[in-house]
Amino acid sequence: MKRVAIFISGGGSNMVSLVDSMTGDHPARPVLVLANSADAGGLQKAAARGIATAVVDHRPFKGDREAFQAALLAELDAAAPDILCLAGFMRVLTASFVSRWQGRMLNIHPSLLPKYRGLHTHARALEAGDDLHGCTVHEVTPELDDGPILGQATVPVLPGDTPDALAARVLVQEHRLYPEVLRRFASGNRETLRLQG
Ligand code: GRF
């Protein structure tokens, strides 16, 4: 049984989808949900599901990224996960952290990578006049939002879409895509999954 740690920063809706999918014959189980802020709403949801939680607030480390990452690594050493999932985790992790977990670390990004790495992906897709948008689950490498793609789900961009409307449509697909990719990844399947919303 693979052990999965999940990093969050906010409400953790992707974390909830992942946790709720790890049942029955699923080859993995959640062992830790960690947030970079004590008021991340996802912490209560994880605790309500009986999952160990941890908080490593990034603010006391301001500027000392290596010290913040060392604190994250200490929590991971204690929980001993096999796989690390970033799920709405809004802190950049540098090569010194990623190199320890590369090959065992996933992230979900709300665009069809390689388009729109970074932030404000929905507004950028609208500005570009794209008629197709979506989300990507990829392996994390030191380059931001750049690792091998494990899965993508597409959604149509509709006339009159606002960034919030588009984000909501993408989020529904994130909750489908990430659990399915994790199940495959945990069973050793690296084939790219493509879903349509
Ligand atoms: C969402 O915008 C999602 O697209 C991205 O992270 C944000 C928060 O997700 N992956 P969550 O509800 O905290 O999982």
Image (spheres, rainbow, N blue to C red):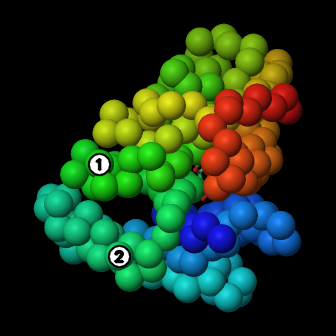
Kindly identify which residue carries mark 1.
Answer: 99
On-image quarter of the N terminus: bottom right
101 relative position to 178: left or right: left
Residue 193 placement (x, y as % from top left): 73, 33
Q: Farthest residue in the top direction?
A: 129
Task: Name the quadrant containing residue 51.
Answer: bottom right
Res. 81 in view: yes
**Is 133 in front, or is 4?**
4
In the image, residue 190 above or below residue 14: above
* Inter-mark Cα distance, 1 to 2: 15 Å
Badge 1 or badge 2: first in the primary sequence = 2
**Is 136 in front, or is 186?**
186
Q: Residues within 10 Å of mark 1 (few under 14, many from 20)?
A: few
Q: Farthest residue in the left direction?
A: 64
5 relative position to 75: left or right: right
In the image, residue 181 above or below residue 120: below
Residue 190 placement (x, y as % from top left): 63, 38
Q: Secondary structure at mark 2?
A: helix
122 relative position to 102: left or right: right
- Type of the residue with mark 2: Asp
Number of marks drawn: 2
Kindly identify which residue carries mark 2.
Answer: 77
